[in-house]
Image (cartoon, grey):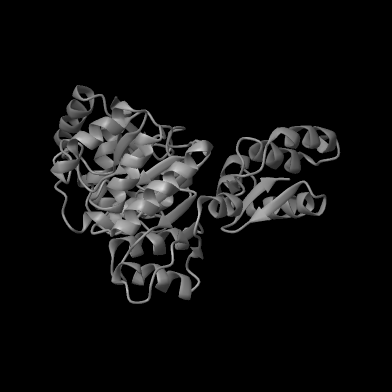
Amino acid sequence: MNDLLYQIALTLVPNIGDVQSKILVHHFGDAQSIFKAKISALEKIEGIGTIRANAIKQFNDFSRAEQEIEFIEQYNIKTFFLTDDTYPKRLLNCYDSPTLLFYKGIADLNASKIVAIIGTRTNTEYGKTFTEKLVKDLSAQNILIVSGLAYGIDAIAHKSALKNHLPTVGVVGHGLNKIYPADHTNLAKEMVQQNGGILTEFLSGTKPDKHNFPLRNRIVAGMSDATIVIETTIKGGSMITAKLADAYNRDVFTVPGRTTDSKSSGCNHLIKHNKAILFTEADEILEVMGWKEKAASKTKKQKELFIELSTEEKQIVTILQEKETVHIDEINFKSGLNSSLVAAAILNLELQNVVGSLPGKLYKLL
């Protein structure tokens, strides 16, 4: 619990954001060591400097961290720090991944297949019907459905997941002491009870202020293999999430709509500017993501070829055997190899027809 105290405290230090926290944790290994470090050591770290070093050394609001620990213990909240094995690995690959996450639920945030389904808060009947059918058609794949627990498409996606016995996680822009909107309190409880969960980076008591939602959106985009946009206007919040997903090298899918329909204007814009893949049915998503193929013959083929592979190639094959598709950042992270070695090994594996590449810097075993 002492580790958690310092982890929470790190999120409270003025002028230390998620990017700086990542730099510090990478340098010192854990949160407590950051606070115990000498100011001279902190100042020398690139991206920290004198002002941020002083902010760390002068920080003394540990009582707020203690208060949060009491809340966590009272309500059985799980926490995921940057160095935890349970931290969402896809999110960890994003440069601005949250330092600490708070989670009420049991869904595996490192599930083999995760998609975000998002859209306007004021959906049309077409958007509702399409979302319900999409989730139903995805249900055979045991995909974790992520969304933002907002009105409209978000809520429809969560409810459809529950109806089709899929785990679903809502990412919220406030603390876990309440649910916003309040109308979705029972929905959130049902999600937690039915193998899903509610996730946030905000301490208890944090209100659902407007500026929190773009931060929430980066978690939705970053923790998912793909982001699916059902309906959105040009300036809708879903456009922010879609652009973030694209920046994170994740696949973005969207449904085309009539040019006269404002609810489809954002979707049509994404397609027009090659920021999203046009799709009309679930099978098209499964095909692009490489989730349609059976894994039965893969292991046998790899065993036959395994003896011919180098040490680095074997490492990468082992990582790829864990799930059907793996992002290049995750391969780099899990292998511990430098990016040049990974690139060379993957190229050799591709030439041997052992590994195939997919859009969004994803790789799979053939």
Q: Nearer the viewer, residue 21 or 79?
A: 79
Residue at 33% from the left image edge and 76% from the top image edge: 260
Q: Residue at x 38, y 47 (%)?
A: 132
x, y percentage for residue 247? 46, 63
Where does the C terminus fall, quadrant-wise? Answer: top right
Residue 34 makes an appearance in the image: no
Residue at (24% x, 36% y) in the render: 188
Q: Is residue 354 left or right of residue 342?
A: right
> For residue 26, what is the image quadrant?
top left
Rendering coords of residue 266 (x, y %): 36, 69
User: Relative to residue 364, is residue 304 drawn left or right?
Assistant: right
- The quadrant the N terminus occupies is top left
How many numbered marks, from 0 up? 0
**307 left or right, relative to 250:** right
Determine whether 63 is above or below 222 in the image: above
Along the line of sight, the residue nearer the viewer: 168 or 320: 168
Q: Quadrant of residue 32?
A: top left
Q: Can residue 256 be seen by looking at this rendering?
A: yes
Q: Position of residue 287 (x, y in %)?
A: 60, 52
Left or right: residue 25 compared with residue 122: right
Q: Is residue 244 above or below residue 93?
A: below
Residue 327 point in image, percent of width and height: 57, 49
Using the image as rendered, state which of residue 220 and residue 56 is in the foreground.
220
